[in-house]
Amino acid sequence: MAVQRITTRNARFQQLQTLLGNRTKRGRAKEFLVQGVRPITMAVEHGWTVRSLLYNGDKPLSRWAEDLLRGNGAERVAMAPQLLAELSEKEDGAAEVLAVVEMPPDTLSRMEVHGDFLGLVFDRPTQPGNIGSIVRSADAFGADGLIVTGHAADPYDPKSVRASTGSFFSVPVVRSQSHHEVMEWLEAERAQGRPVAVVGTDEHGDADVSEFDLTQPVLLLIGNETAGLSAAWRELCDHVISIPMTGSASSLNASNAATVVLYEAHRQRLRKRRTA
């Protein structure tokens, strides 16, 4: 396969650079940048489409990188090291390989609803790192996917993808304009005999998270980092649960709160399977 070379800040380099910080152009191109051995490996293993592989054209590659380039049909781009370092956004030099990966469609059907369904909604998040952290926890505790709703940070922002440490490629992450789309999808699933409970999290919840049955099919709602759940989502909740706390903290970081509830759901489900 022919190798493209980039040694100057030409039009192709500038286009790649927009994938880092320009959400609009990233969305228009339907592609995003991924770095790191584990994230790129996960993307390939889970069948994501890798459009281009960027690498340092001035030094030998590791066995992993050579195998990646040899085993993938993506466009190969050999870059000047200083340009690769700019795209890597690393203080300690360039990543060995960067992957340009195609975005999948934002269709809620990517999340499979089943008898043990555990999904999440993150309502209007402002910090992309929190999205990635929740995706990582969702992967660790067996959740089926994350829906990001409303005017929100971009899940495909490099900070989000990095914070997920590769889990972004094994857990479906879907962007949805509003609660209306999500509820239409959920009502259609309920009509097919899949009774999913909508469960919000709030410091003034009706039940303690450890006392609530999280073994049933659940769509867990996580509110905006500052304002919490929107009024619309709060009205749609079948139940609202809280995390008991001591000390002077009034609330937890959104990703920490999600992790606590995901862990509790996982604990309850493990216990149910062991006693069945």
Image: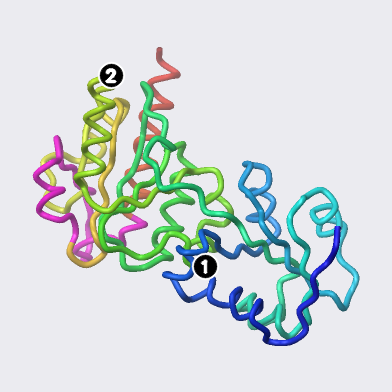
Name the residue: 73% across, 62% down: 53
Name the residue: 80% across, 75% down: 5
Residue 253 forms part of the magenta stretch: yes
Instruction: Say which residue label 2 marks.
Output: 192
Which quarter shows the N terminus? bottom right
Q: Amino acid at mark 2?
A: Gln
Instruction: Say which residue label 1 marks.
Output: 158
In percent of width and height, residue 179 lies at 21, 47
- Secondary structure category for the residue under label 2: loop
Give the residues in magenta: 228-256
Quarter of the image for residue 50 reads bottom right
Q: Residues within 10 Å of mark 1 (few under 14, many from 20)?
A: many
- Secondary structure category for the residue under label 1: helix
Name the residue: 75% across, 60% down: 75
How far is disc 2 from disc 1 in space, using C-alphas? 37 Å
Q: Amino acid at mark 1?
A: Pro
Marking on residue 115: none
In percent of width and height, residue 25 lies at 47, 70
In percent of width and height, residue 202 lies at 17, 51
As drawn, is 236 to the left or to the right of 124?
left
Quarter of the image for residue 84 reads bottom right
Q: Earlier in the sequence, mark 2 or mark 1?
A: 1
Nearer to me, 83 or 235: 83
Residue 91 forms part of the magenta stretch: no
Query: Decide: marks 2, 1 in contact (CB < 8 A)?
Result: no
